Image (spheres, rainbow, N blue to C red):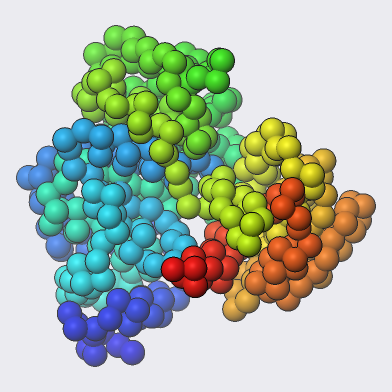
Amino acid sequence: MNSLSLGLTSSLNEWLHYLESLHPKEIDLGLDRVKHVANQMDLYLKLSSLDAKIITVAGTNGKGSCVATLESLVLSTEKSVGTYTSPHFLDYNERIRINGENASDESIVSAFCDIEKARGDVRLTYFEFGTLAAIWLFIESNVDVIVLEVGLGGRLDAVNAFDPNIAVVTSVALDHQDWLGNDRETIGFEKAGIFRRDKPAICVDEHPPHSVVQFAEKISANLLLKDRDINWHCENKLFHWQGVDKNGNTLTLDKLPIPKLPFPSVAAALQAIALLGIDVLKLPLSNVLPSLSLTGRAQEISIDGKRILLDVAHNPAAALYLRDRLEKESAQKILGVFAVMADKDYPSIFNALTSKIDHWFVSGIIDNPRAETAEKLGTVLVELGLDVDTYGTVRESFAAALAHATDRDLIVVLGSFYTVADVLNNFYYSHRFHQM
C-alpha cells in the first residue's frame, strides 16, 4: 500500500501498516526529521499560541507510571491534559489520550493525513509519525498540559523535538545498551538530554549518575534531586511526601493513602505538578492516589479464580523492584511466565528472581524475530538449577501455568510488553467478554 491510496476514509490499521513500511529501521534516533515536519505543519507556532505546559518524562523504569500519575493529578483539577505513551497493549489509540480517553481512530487518521502531506520525501519512523500525531491532536483539543513519555533514551528521541517546561528522569539503569551505551553514566547523559536551560529538571533516581547532574549544571537547568529537594517514605501504612513549590518553598503532604504505582514515579509527578503552579495541598489526593493504576505494571487480575500479576519488567533493575514486591507475597507458590527480547540481560533477571519464583514457564514470542527462543531461556534456567518448562508461545506457557496453579498460588507474567499483551489479549479480555 502507498500513500496515494490512503486518506481520511482509510482505516487506522491501513495507516499503521503503511507506517511500518515507510522507514527501513524500527528505531532511528535523531531529531532532524521530526523538527522539519513539525515546522512544515506549523506545530511550533501553534504550540506557542496554545501556551500549553509540556512535561517530558524519561527513565529506564517508572516513566509510564509517572505519566499515569501526572494524568490523574491534572484531571483532578479543572485543567485539561493530553498524554502520549508507548508502546500499546491492545489498540494503538492507547498511545494518545486526551483527558483520560483514548483518541479515536478518526482523529488519529486525520492527523496522519496532515503529517503525510507535510513530510514530503522525509521518511519518518513509526514512532516519529505517532509523536507528531499526538502533538497535532493535543493542539486541536486545546489542552492545558501535555505529558510526553520518551520512547528510547531522551536526547535523540522524537519527543525531545518539543521543548518541555518541566523534564523528569525517573531512573537510570542498564537497558537498550545497543543504542544508549553500556554504563549508567553514558545512559544518564542520554536521558538528561531532555533537560532545558533555566527550566526545572527532576531526577528521582536513588543514585543519579554524575552525568545527569553535570549536564544540568552545564545548561543551568534547575535540577531537583531525591533526598536534597524531594523526599518520600511510608510509615504506619501511610505515604508521606515533601517537595518544593515553583518559588522554592517547602511543601509537605502527610498521611496519604499508599499509591499502587512505584513511589519514585508518584513523588516525581507530585513535584512536577507543584512546579506547574498547581496547589498540591488542595488536590483530592486521598481519592487520586489509591486509584492509580497502569496496565501491565504490577497489575493484578484474576482468571479462572487464579491470581495473576502482570509486570512488563524486562531489565535487571525492574526485576529487582518486582522482587521487592514479591517479598510481601503470601502465596503458597509463585509461578513465572516469561518471554523476552534476545538483547535483554535475562540471566540477570533470572538471578534477581531466583529466590521468589518457584517454577518458570518460558516461551518465545510468535511472529517476533527479536524475541529470545524458549530453548535458550530454558538452558540458562537449568544451569541456574531452577525448575523450568519450555513452550513455543506465550499462550501455551500461560495456559500451562494456569493449569498448574492452585487458588493459593500466584502467577507472575513478565519479560516484555509483548508477553503481557499476549496474556491480556488471549486470556483476560476474551475471558471477560465471554462472561458478559
Q: Position of residue 268 (x, y in %)?
A: 41, 29
263 with respect to 41 (left or right)? right
Name the residue at 44% across, 15% down.
255
| Image spot of residue 289 (x, y percent) | 40, 32
Q: Name the outermost residue toward the front.
A: 436
Quarter of the C terminus within the rendering = bottom left
Q: Is residue 58 left or right of residue 197?
A: right
**Relative to 355, is 1 above or below?**
below
Q: Is residue 238 left or right of residue 99?
A: right
Can the viewer see residue 248 in this picture?
yes
Front one among 382 and 45:
382
**What residue appears at the point 18 percent right and 43 percent down from the top-left corner?**
80
Where in the figure is residue 336, as x and y percent of width and height? 73, 55
Residue 312 shows up from this direction:
no
329 lies left or right of 228: right
The extreme left residue here reads 49
Looking at the figure, which quarter contains the N terminus?
A: bottom left
Residue lying at 23% horizontally and 48% vertically, measured from the top left: 99
Tell me the residue at 41%/76% (across/down): 20
Residue 37 in the image: state x and y as whole percent: 22, 63
Q: How many marks?
A: 0
Query: Which sits in the foreground, 240 or 401?
Result: 401
